[in-house]
């Protein structure tokens, strides 16, 4: 494949051509040349007004429904929506059926993951069945290619389990991801606890439930590193807190980073699109966990993104079939599909400049996940996302098997035109 | 008679003050009807109503059924026990099957907050909420308001204390909306664990001392302790609840003026209310039940006009 990207703005702070409009020539899956008015010759030419190119984006939080729940999403469909969302790499949570808690299951999934334009990385469970009780064989899973460890949709409740997992994983130079939620405080909870939940008679999930666990996890991390040749620095963290949603949670991570704790965190792209007052009509497409919080929390999340406290923006892609969503509110499952809309929502709601949004979608998650760095420079592998930040588009059709998104039919800003990876291209 | 601004009665929150007055005024006329020797009018002769109850109920279902029969509607009853719900049928399928048999209105009780709202946006029939989980119970609030208005003349400036399990009560929320729209002042009172954290932002006073609440109010609306809806522990024992939050005759007699005592039923005698209080001259509990039929007749009649 020989491909010329004509007059594209390079968005990559690690590249000497950052923010410059250049021609980029890709040959045999490698960036062959970057320059002005390059000869196209036999190359396929792609160009468009206002197009940008950056290293391929990474989504650190995608619910894996395959194997076990292929009617919600399978490998093929998740690749399709990831590509359309501009992602060349996604990290899949281990909450399939069976749970990714043994080398056998991991290998079964990895054999599906042949070289394609979207690379699927697999996180293995910390505990068997992700039930939070007995450890999985973590060294074995790590050697077999587990990209990170997490119980995924099940936050680790037992402090001792989390502590021991941190201690055990630390020498492996890998990552433990935990979503902070004290499930005793959120039992039967349906949405953020506040005036709206009171008005709707829905059981609330207090912000405290998240903050207690952020506090606990940070304390456990510090304790795990005591007397244990502590290396300050957050470049390659040991603990990654996923889906922060409250003001105090952001504040606590900010303080921990100041002290040099090896911690990083992310938030969902949709978290800023709604606050809890949006649930007035019991729309189950707005039922997510963590729930939509208050305007004050959203402001704190924006500040956390701006000052780097929040490292990464994730889609938290959680596909569900209609049977799990077209129900009474408290019977419906949590989650919305996010891969197709994550970039647009991040651009529209975070207040960040394009290059900052892109950094939180590519360079930072690559560092945190210990993936090879990619850059828009000559000689680098062509792992690229091509997009147009100013373009508006209407989300008329989702390519996910699931349709649980509140954004269908909406006009969004920030459009993905294609991805290049592993010598393959996808154009939209 | 005037019309309502809504097609469904989903909750008091969706009603205007005018709607509430229309319903109460209409109920006044129906109360006269049900006290005649022939207690029936032909108003809904061509209408079929299904009472769809996914939660146990005795008085609300009976009250609706009598209201429907007094209006000459055809009535069918469906209750969840032994029904297809246990076979895994969805709410929407269950109701659509009932509607396929040419039913015009659905009166529904359901354990999920918002279930009638969900239904109303997906079916052509009128929906009346007969209680949705811990959300609303609009006809109860309307009959409470009717009974208070009947006893006190007006609700403007009157003080109403809602005492007991506010957290699990759909009656509390509907009553707060209704009373505020009619110009009354509302206090909620109970153990701190049974008062929703954010309820003060609805503009109600919050109290934890029952004697003080009784002293403050013109009307005490005492709620049932919803043991069946408490899957988590909120207070240590019924004994302690009765001792520190229950109301007895002596407490009422010690007040410097007479207050009105209400309860939506069923009463846990000896828990939230002692028998001598429930049966005292303060109590209008049985009037509430009588008025319930008239108010529900008004609601069904007015919705059928839409």
Image: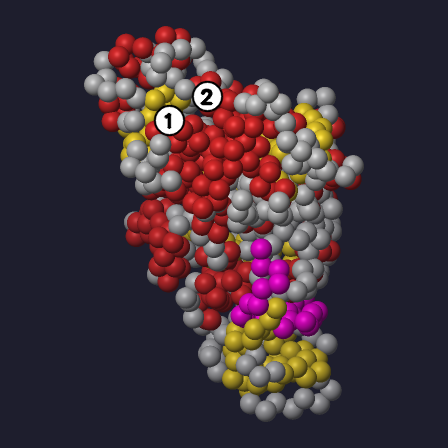
Q: From the viewer's perspective, is B271 left or right of B293?
A: left
Residues rendered magenta in the picture: A406-428
Residue under the image location 67 percent in, 88 percent down:
A40
Identify the residue at the far right of this view: B101
| Chain of the residue that carries numbered disc 1 in the rendered image | B
Q: Is residue B99 left or right of residue A259?
A: right
Q: Where does the image place residue A284, in percent across and percent down from the top left?
A: 58, 46
* Quadrant, the N terminus of chain B: top right
Q: Is residue A291 above or below residue A343?
A: above
Q: Answer yes or no: is residue B59 visible.
A: yes
The residue that mark 1 highlights is B151
Disc 1 residue crowd, few under 14, some 14–19, many 20+, Cα 10 Å: few
Q: CA distance from mark 1 to mark 2?
A: 10 Å
Q: Contact (CB < 8 A) between labels 1 and 2? A: yes
* Most foreground residue, B49 or A184: B49
The kind of secondary structure the magenta stretch mainly shows is: strand
Coordinates of residue B272 in the picture (x, y in percent): 39, 16
Residue B132 point in image, percent of width and height: 55, 33
Marks counted in the figure total 2
From what the image shows, is residue A25 above or below residue A90? Answer: below
Q: Which mark is residue B287?
A: 2
- Nearest the viewer among B60 and A21 is B60
Q: Nearer the viewer, residue A241 or B139?
A: B139
Q: Say whether residue A53 is visible.
A: no
**Disc 1 element:** helix
- Work out whether residue A258 or residue B111 is closer to the camera in this orientation and state it: B111
Disc 2 on helix, strand or loop? helix
């Amino acid at each position: 494949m020989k491909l010329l990207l004509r007059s594209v703005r390079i968005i990559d702070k690690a590249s000497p051509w950052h923010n410059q409009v250049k021609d980029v020539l890709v040959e045999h899956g490698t960036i062959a040349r970057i320059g002005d008015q390059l000869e196209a010759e036999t190359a396929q030419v792609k160009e468009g007004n206002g197009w940008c190119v950056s290293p391929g984006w990474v989504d650190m939080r995608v619910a894996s429904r395959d194997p076990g729940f292929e009617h919600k999403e399978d490998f093929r469909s998740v690749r399709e929506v990831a590509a359309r969302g501009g992602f060349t790499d996604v990290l899949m949570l281990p909450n399939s059926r069976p749970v990714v808690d043994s080398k056998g299951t991991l290998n079964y999934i990895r054999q599906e993951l042949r070289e394609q334009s979207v690379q699927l990385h697999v996180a293995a469970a910390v505990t068997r069945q992700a039930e939070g009780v007995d450890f999985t064989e973590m060294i074995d899973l790590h050697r077999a290619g587990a990209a990170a460890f997490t119980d995924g949709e099940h936050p680790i409740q037992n402090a001792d389990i989390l502590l021991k997992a941190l201690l055990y994983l630390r020498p492996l130079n890998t990552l433990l991801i935990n979503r902070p939620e004290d499930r005793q405080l959120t039992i039967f909870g349906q949405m953020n606890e506040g005036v709206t939940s009171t008005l709707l008679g829905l059981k609330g999930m207090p912000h405290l439930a998240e903050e207690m666990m952020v506090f606990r996890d940070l304390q456990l991390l510090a304790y795990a590193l005591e007397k244990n040749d502590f290396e300050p620095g957050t470049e390659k963290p040991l603990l990654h807190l996923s889906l922060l949603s409250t003001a105090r949670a952001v504040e606590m991570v900010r303080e921990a980073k100041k002290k040099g704790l090896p911690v990083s965190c992310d938030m969902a792209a949709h978290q800023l699109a709604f606050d809890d007052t949006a649930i007035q009509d019991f729309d189950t497409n707005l039922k997510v966990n963590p729930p939509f919080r208050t305007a004050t929390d959203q402001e704190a999340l924006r500040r956390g993104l701006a000052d780097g406290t929040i490292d990464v923006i994730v889609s938290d892609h959680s596909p569900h079939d209609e049977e799990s969503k077209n129900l009474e509110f408290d019977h419906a499952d949590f989650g919305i599909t996010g891969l197709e809309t994550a970039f647009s929502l991040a651009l529209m709601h975070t207040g960040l400049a394009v290059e900052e949004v892109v950094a939180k979608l590519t360079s930072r998650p690559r560092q945190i996940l210990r993936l090879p760095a990619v850059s828009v420079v000559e000689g680098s592998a062509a792992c690229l996302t091509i997009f147009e930040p100013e373009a508006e588009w209407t989300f008329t059709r989702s390519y996910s098997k699931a349709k649980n998104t509140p954004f269908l039919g909406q006009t969004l800003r920030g459009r993905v035109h294609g991805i290049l990876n592993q010598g393959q291209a996808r154009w939209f | 008679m005037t019309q309502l601004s809504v097609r469904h009665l989903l909750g008091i929150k969706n009603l205007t003050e005018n709607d509430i007055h229309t319903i109460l005024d209409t109920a006044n006329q129906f109360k006269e009807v049900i006290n005649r020797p022939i207690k029936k009018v032909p108003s809904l002769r061509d209408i079929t109503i299904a009472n769809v109850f996914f939660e146990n109920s005795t008085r609300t279902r009976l009250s609706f059924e009598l209201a429907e029969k007094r209006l000459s509607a055809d009535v069918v009853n469906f209750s969840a026990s032994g029904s297809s719900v246990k076979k895994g049928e969805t709410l929407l399928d269950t109701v659509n099957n009932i509607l396929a048999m040419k039913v015009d209105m659905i009166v529904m009780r359901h354990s999920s907050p918002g279930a009638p709202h969900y239904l109303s946006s997906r079916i052509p029939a009128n929906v009346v909420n007969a209680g949705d989980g811990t959300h609303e119970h609009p006809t109860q609030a309307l009959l409470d308001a009717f009974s208070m208005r009947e006893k006190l003349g007006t609700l403007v400036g009157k003080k109403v204390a809602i005492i007991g399990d506010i957290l699990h009560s759909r009656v509390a929320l509907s009553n707060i909306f209704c009373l505020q729209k009619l110009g009354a002042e509302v206090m909620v009172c109970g153990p701190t664990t049974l008062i929703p954290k954010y309820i003060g932002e609805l503009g109600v006073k919050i109290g934890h001392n029952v004697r003080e609440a009784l002293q403050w109010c013109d009307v005490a609306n005492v709620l049932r302790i919803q043991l069946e809806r408490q899957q988590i522990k909120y207070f240590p024992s019924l004994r302690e609840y009765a001792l520190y939050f229950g109301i007895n005759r002596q407490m009422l007699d010690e007040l410097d003026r007479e207050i009105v005592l209400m309860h939506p039923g069923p009463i846990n005698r000896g828990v939230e209310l002692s028998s001598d209080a429930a049966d005292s001259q303060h109590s209008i509990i049985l009037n509430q039940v009588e008025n319930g039929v008239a108010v529900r007749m008004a609601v069904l009649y007015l919705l059928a006009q839409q």
